[in-house]
Amino acid sequence: VSAPSAAGPGPAAPTASPAGPAAPRPRRWRPVAPAWLPTIRAQLILGVTAVHLMLVAGLTVEVVTRQRSFLTQQSREEAEGLARLLALNSSSWVLANDVAGLGEMVAALREHADLRYAVVASTGGQVLAHTDPGKVGLHLTDPQSLAVLQGPPLLQVVHADEALLDVAAPVFSSTGDCIAWVRIGEGQEAITRNLAAVRRDGLVLGLAAALLGAAFAAAVGFRLTTRTRHLLSISQGVRAGRTDLRANLGGGDELAQLGAGFDAMLDGIQARECENARLEAELLHAQRLESVGRLAGGVAHDFNNLLTAIVGNAELIRDQLPEGDLRTSAGEILEAGRRAAEVTRGLLAFSRKQLLSPARLDLREVVRGTDRLLARLIGEDIQVVLRTSEEALEVVGNRAQLEQVLMNLGTNARDAMPAGGTLTIEVSSAELPDAEVAARGLRSRRLALVAVRDTGCGMDPATRSRIFDPFFTTKEVGKGTGLGLSMAYGILRQHGGCIEVQSEPGRGTTFLLYLPLAPATGPDVAAVRSTPAPTDAPVRPVTAGAVGAVGVPGQETILLARVRGALDHRGRESGS
Amino acid sequence: VAALAGCQVEPRATYAPSYGARPARELAVYRLAVHPLHNPQRLAEVYGPIVAHLNQRLGGPVLQLEAARSYEEFESKLYGRNYELALPNPHQTLHALHSGYRVFGKMGDDQRFRGLILVRRDAGLLRVEQLRGTTVSFPAPTALAATMLPLWYLHTHGLDANRDIRRRYTGSQESSIMSVYLGDSAAAATWDVPWEAFQRSRPEMAAALVVRWITDPLLNNSLMARDDVPPDLVQRVGALLFALHESPEGARLLAQIPISRFEPASAETYGPVQAFLDTYERTIQ
């Protein structure tokens, strides 16, 4: 029997699999809570109180029964002893029919608190002595007394109930003849009073035990239900979306353990949600960079073609002009075009539209190869520390591009450490969980990791979130294109890897470069080539003597015109 | 729990002996009182079997033996007509005649109805005169054989019983004997029956004593009936008693007393006793 579930959505009831009959499930014991005992606290209080009352009542009944038996036996022994003693002492007085002497003996028995009467009667039933002197001379007439008088001369109980115990003892002469009877009537009020006192004490103890038990149960129940309700409120809050709530139940009991487990579950949920949010943010960021890259790549592609014409024509014009202002202006046009070509090259790298010549590389050698260049680039104030693993870390990639990435990161590190510091480059292997691999868009779990760590000023989260955006820079105007990290991002993505940053203001910055390790056999260039190959070569300034058999990299008219013009110019100059 | 502890119900008595002025079963009971020849228990031992013997043969009326703890008590009841039948001593017999009793028999063996005067063997008392100034114990002033005869003996053998000795009445025959044994008195008066009983029950004490003087005998104790007792019952009781010595069983009962027989008697039989008492009472105060 299951109680109706609480209001609100609950866990869906398990249903049988449509593929076949459901496997038998183990039966679950479900206690039945009476409707009139809706709470654990009430059940606990009533249960403990009832148990206490039943126990004390049972104990009292047992004690009363035993006490009644003991007191009754004691009273009987006392009455029999008294009757025997009176019978023994009465013998001579009965033989002498000395009712005065018998009367004195019987009167002495009045000191016994529970004595109702003491009688010495002849064998014919005439009262010879009585604690009530007015009955001396009368005759016993009740059936029980007559039965005693006519029966065998034995010590016997004539009557026994809760009010009276009547014992008869024969009086013997020295010859053994029964010459009279003694009757002792002993009231049982003392027993009744004693038993009543026991019952009273039992009641008091029972009530005290019940009260203490109820108080204890109430305290335990209060603590239990309060904490249970607290857990319930926490669960309701979590269901409403509050993942920051925690039970924080103190103590070491089972409920506290349940609360700790509950909190641990909430911690796990919150951590997972944070991780999901982080991954989602990263995904959004990656998508945004992808969009930007696609846009920038498209623009750079077109712009690169235009620049080819601009630069080529500017070069022709400059070469045909005499020395003077116009030639200088043409040279400035040419220089501006070259700088623009650099920008487009960065954008193409960011958008992964550069041509690659992939090869199987040991990443350690690539990094070591940049050591001298980096030292020259970043100056003497910054110490470069290089740590590489002992095992070879082979990747498939383009050495120049990877070196370019390291140089860009070195440049940024230098700028982040104007007062000097340490630039540490560590090369190692890494293996990420499948979820991390998928979240990062990687193709392999087995990775080479290059960590580039500086001790510079670090970045705040806002800066950190935009560093891979094209043209984003924190440097002064004219000191950076804002494409270095974008290029690094694009190059790593183009190599099937990724780049991540860890940084906090004042605590330095670490760039993590993940590259998939190459398969054990044969160069795997497909991975790199699979990246959409750019249809446009980067702008390459065409210089005199650099062209022999010239191929035309593009089909655009402008480009053809520019090539034609350049050939004409060369032909005129050389006369061929 | 409330029922257990809260309800203290006073138990109501369901029984109490009931009493009536008349017995539930009417039985004709006749008390046969024997004067304190012995203490009550001893008296019951001696005379109880005889009473039982009579009850077995009477077939209707019941005789009930009654002892007395002292002569005073016995005489008080006797003269107050509390006994239907009695076995008083001769002196009491004469007084009881004035209380409505009649003599219908007596113990036999009158020669044994005599007084004895005991002294300690180590007392060195050989002559009556040696008792002068001493204490002599007696059972009771009215004990004919154990008091009156010994006093008369002392009075007629050299002492003034009124002046030369201090009398101590102990209340019973045995107490009188014990008095001289314990040294409370120089001599003790008793008579044959209690002395023989004492010798049987306490021989070590009796061995320290000796009968120094013996009085002349007189008539033995009588059997009396109150004048309202049916004559046929008296006759039947008498007949049974007088025939006791004729059967071995009866003889054994008589030996307990000890006498050889009961015999018929009348008030006139005790004429000599009356004569002795007249003289005694004029002489001994």
Image (cartoon, rainbow, N blue to C red):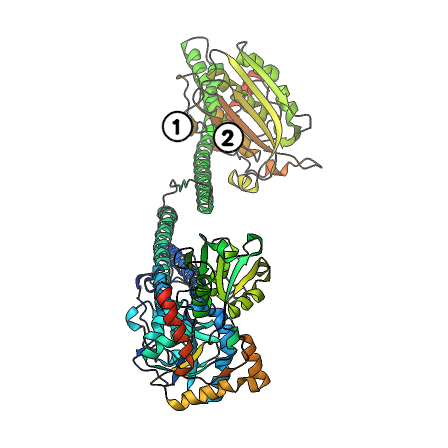
Nearer to us in this view, A184 or B240: B240
Please name the amino acid that badge 1 sits on.
Ala
Viewer can see residue A560: no
Residue A500 is tagged as 2
- Above or below, comparing residue A242 to residue B208 in the picture: above
Q: Secondary structure at mark 2?
A: strand
Image coordinates of residue A307 in percent, x first then y, are 46, 25
Helix or strand or loop: what does disc 1 sit on?
helix
Q: Is residue A402 visible?
A: yes
The image's mark for residue B249 is none
Image quadrant where residue A104 sits: bottom left
Image height of B29 relative to A338, above or below: below
> Percent from the top left, x then y, of residue A276?
45, 41
Q: Quadrant of residue A61?
A: bottom left
Q: Nearer the viewer, residue A226 or A209?
A: A209
User: Which residue is at the front of the view, A421 or A307?
Assistant: A421
Q: Quadrant of the C terminus of chain A?
A: top right
Chain to which mark 2 belongs: A
Q: CA distance from mark 2 to mark 1?
A: 15 Å
Asked whether, in this view, residue A127 is left or right of residue A514, the answer is: left
Split into 4 quadrants, where in the image is the N terminus of chain A? bottom left
Picture coordinates of residue B112 (x, y %)? 52, 73
Numbered disc 1: what chain? A
Q: Residue furthest bottom?
A: B232
Q: Residue at x 53, y 77 (%)?
A: B259
Quarter of the view holding residue A385? top right
As shown in the figure, which amino acid type bears the numbered disc 2? Glu
Q: Earlier in the sequence, mark 2 or mark 1?
A: 1
